[in-house]
Image (tube, grey):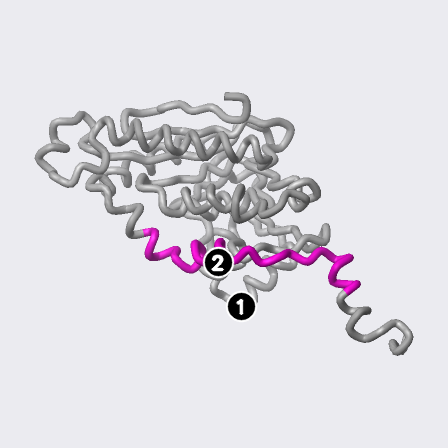
Amino acid sequence: MPYLKLTRPSPTVWQISLSSPPDNRLTPPLLSELLETLDTVEAQWRKVGGGIFDAKQREEYEGKGAGALVITSEVEKFFSNGLDWAKSLKIKNFFEEIFDPVTWRLLTFPLITVAAINGHAFAGGMVLALCCDYRIITSGKGYLCMNEVQFGSPLPNSFNALLSLRIPHPQQQRDTLLARRWTQKELLSMGLVDEIVDGSEVIRRAVEVGQKEGIKIAAGSWGAIKRGMYNPVLEASKSYRPLNLPPQEEKEFWDRVGKEKAKL
């Protein structure tokens, strides 16, 4: 696979490593490959007993239906630098039809999901990490930042809904939207990450968390439980609300007030 690698570090843990230098931009081809790979992981999990409702039947499998997915990066410095916004916004219905399906899938994934954040996660990359159930972050280079305001991009409804759920504190939400680069200690105090570990230990620790927590979802209801929890994000993703770029905002303003009437 050209954009990511799928491995299995333990019988009950799968690992997707983004591998798209230089900074793991979430392009349409990468997102499509990620969506297909999530289907592969779920299929393999179900074939080894995952999601079987009858506990006695699950006992017949080595992993007893446990399952977790670790998402990480093979690119030095970056977990993901987010979208190529200039190109993405030119694609009609990009969020609703290309990006959001990946976030829906992760938010409602039936396995435990752990983001092993071994580098910076900006914009769409931060959103990708926030879609996971757990987040383990490096003590090295690893800011989380929604920096869209700095390059003039609006946020789609799905981003706003997810950030409102993950960051309910008004001041923290405001600072996030104003592109604050949250440090690891700040993220831990906010509850946005679960642990800070040495850089070389991020993936190993994420696998450990997956092994420990993955047994809880063996009966197969975790995805359905999350579907209810994250319903506001799922509904927001269906809005098809046009995103106004700065030139459009400017035009709307002048059309409303009239240039000849404006007191400049």
Which residue is rendered at x = 58% and y = 45% of the image? 94
**Number of marks drawn:** 2
The secondary structure that most of the magenta stretch takes on is helix
Magenta-colored stretch includes residue 143:
no
Which stretch did the figure color magenta? Answer: 226-251
* Mark 1 crowd level (few <14, some 14–19, many ≥20, 10 Å Cα): few
Do the CB atoms of the residues marked 2 and 1 lie less than 8 Å apart? no
Using residue 158 as the reference point, say whether residue 110 is left or right of it. Answer: left
| Front-most of residues 150 and 143 | 150
Q: Helix, strand, or loop for circle 1? A: helix
Tell me: residue 53, above or below residue 12.
below
Label 2 or label 1, whichever lies nearer to me, is 2
Image location (x, y in percent) of residue 238:
48, 55
* Amino acid on which the number 1 mark rests in the picture: Pro
Which residue is rendered at x = 54% and y = 22% of the image? 2
Image location (x, y in percent) of residue 253:
77, 69
| Front-most of residues 132 and 229 | 229
Q: Helix, strand, or loop for circle 2? A: helix
Which residue is rendered at x = 68% and y = 44% of the image? 90
Image location (x, y in percent) of residue 258:
85, 74
* Amino acid on which the number 2 mark rests in the picture: Ala
Which residue is rendered at x = 75% and y = 58% of the image? 246
Residue for badge 2: 236
Using residue 240 as the reference point, say whether residue 197 is left or right of it. Answer: left
Tell me: residue 242, above or below residue 144.
below
Determine the residue located farthest toward the top in the rendered image: 1
**How far apart are labels 2 and 1 at the CA level?**
20 Å
Quadrant the C terminus occupies: bottom right
Residue for badge 1: 170
Q: Could one spot residue 176 in this view of the protein?
A: yes
